[in-house]
Image: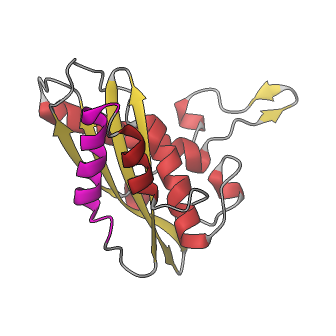
Amino acid sequence: MAAGADPLAFRLDMVSQAHPASARVLESVARMSDWRNRPDGVGRGVAFTWSFGTPVAEVVEVADSDAGIRITRAWIACDVGIALNPRNIRAQMQSALIYGLSAAVHGEITFDGGEVEQFNFPDYDALRIGSAPEVEVEVLENNTRMGGVGEPGTPPSMAALANALFDLTGVRARELPLTSRFDFAL
């Protein structure tokens, strides 16, 4: 990292004084992913966002395989304030992560003769069960206000994936879709 610091510790240092609930999601995702003890041959990336009043931290793990790079695992910690239905919150965070990873890996709108080729979701590729990571979600209730749960899991997924790819390969992702630069096992 350009700052010369551990990526997760760097983020934690930036938010710990300003917003304790945000610091707690970073601490939780570090614990969940066992951030300091990474297996050999994998890359891990972390990202954080404050979206719709909800702090969300995610760690994405990637690994090389004979078929290409696999997105193997992901951890999400979010703090929604009062969690009215934790199962729904976990489902929303998981689906937001998959939506974001799909956009990062496949997200390209193409044109033919001036017309968009992807008219709707059936024309736009997404991660399938076989290429989706194992996901663990922890819902915290430290935030002083209730936050949203529909979209907040999407933005950090893309950045965490790009950071994991850098950790694995040493190559920074500078354009989307990521399949233009990296060979994924999909």
Q: Locate residue 141 relative to residue 8 in the image: left or right.
A: left
Q: Locate residue 55 relative to residue 177 in the image: left or right.
A: left
Residue 84: percent from left, percent from top? 11, 23
Residue 17, quarter of the rendered image: top left
Residue 48: percent from left, percent from top? 42, 41
Residue at the image position 80 percent from the left and 25 percent from the top: 115
The relative height of residue 8 versus residue 55 in the rendered view (above or below) is below
The relative height of residue 94 versus residue 133 in the rendered view (above or below) is above
Q: Locate residue 36 relative to residue 46 in the image: left or right.
A: left
The stretch drawn in magenta includes residue 19: yes
The stretch drawn in magenta includes residue 173: no
User: What secondary structure is the stretch in magenta mostly built from?
Assistant: helix
Residue 24: percent from left, percent from top? 24, 42
The one nearer the camera, 114 or 58, is 58
Residue at the image position 46 percent from the left and 57 percent from the top: 7
The one nearer the camera, 7 or 74, is 7
The relative height of residue 85 versus residue 38 in the rendered view (above or below) is above
| Rendering colour mode | secondary structure
Residue that extends furthest to the front in the rendered view of this protein: 17
Name the image quarter holding the N terminus: bottom right
The one nearer the camera, 133 or 19, is 19
Residue 22: percent from left, percent from top? 31, 36
The magenta segment: 18-36
Residue 23, quarter of the rendered image: top left
Q: Is residue 101 visible?
A: no
Residue at the image position 31 percent from the left and 27 percent from the top: 54
Q: Is residue 13 visible?
A: yes
Residue at the image position 43 percent from the left and 59 percent from the top: 131
The one nearer the camera, 87 or 114, is 87
Q: How many marks?
A: 0
